[in-house]
Amino acid sequence: MAPHAKVAHGQTACVVSLNDMAVRPPRILADNEVIALGNNRRVRYLNTPHVPRGWEAGVLYEERRARCCAAICSRSSATSGR
């Protein structure tokens, strides 16, 4: 698996819930921050409070293909089974 993996999310989600739930401290992403994944792949985090759901919502998308990732970064969508 990925023994050194970290949860990454916006500041609100990290402060409100992820600090309490994650095994390791989460990485707090700034609005418009880019994360390099290797193999010329990068994802960008956009803070989108209240869109689509809660105030901790955000969007993570792969820049090269200009597609949204499989899940929108919000606690409520992560627990809804989608």
Image: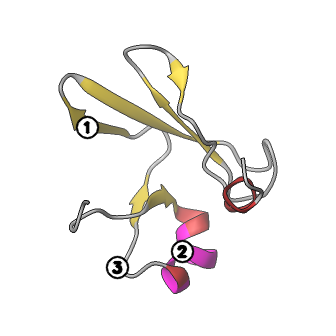
How dense is the environment of label 1, judged by Cα within 10 Å: few (below 14), some, or many (20 and up)? few
* 10 Å crowding of disc 2: few (<14), some (14-19), many (20+): many
Ranked by sequence position, the earlier of labels 2 and 1 is: 2
Q: Is residue 48 left or right of residue 44?
A: right
Residue at 49%, 15% (x, y): give it.
Answer: 66
Q: Find residue 18 and name its label.
A: 2
User: In the current view of this chain or complex, which residue is farthest to the left?
Assistant: 39
Q: Which amino acid, mark 1?
A: Leu
Residue 81 is drawn in which quadrant? bottom right
Which residue sits at x=61%, y=42%?
71
Residue 65: x and y, percent? 43, 13
In the image, the segment drawn in magenta is 14-20
Name the secondary structure under disc 2: helix
Q: Amino acid at mark 3?
A: Arg
Q: Counting residues from the N terminus, which is met first, the one under dot 2 or under dot 3?
A: 2
The total number of labels drawn is 3
Q: Is residue 40 left or right of residue 66?
A: left
User: Disc 1 designates what residue?
Assistant: 37
Q: Residue furthest bottom?
A: 20
Q: Above or below — where is 25 with respect to 40?
A: below
Find out whether the residues at labels 1 and 3 contact each other: C-beta distance under 8 Å.
no
Does the segment drawn in magenta span residue 16?
Answer: yes
Location of mark 3 (residue): 24
Quadrant where the N terminus sits is: bottom left
Q: CA distance from mark 1 to mark 3?
A: 20 Å
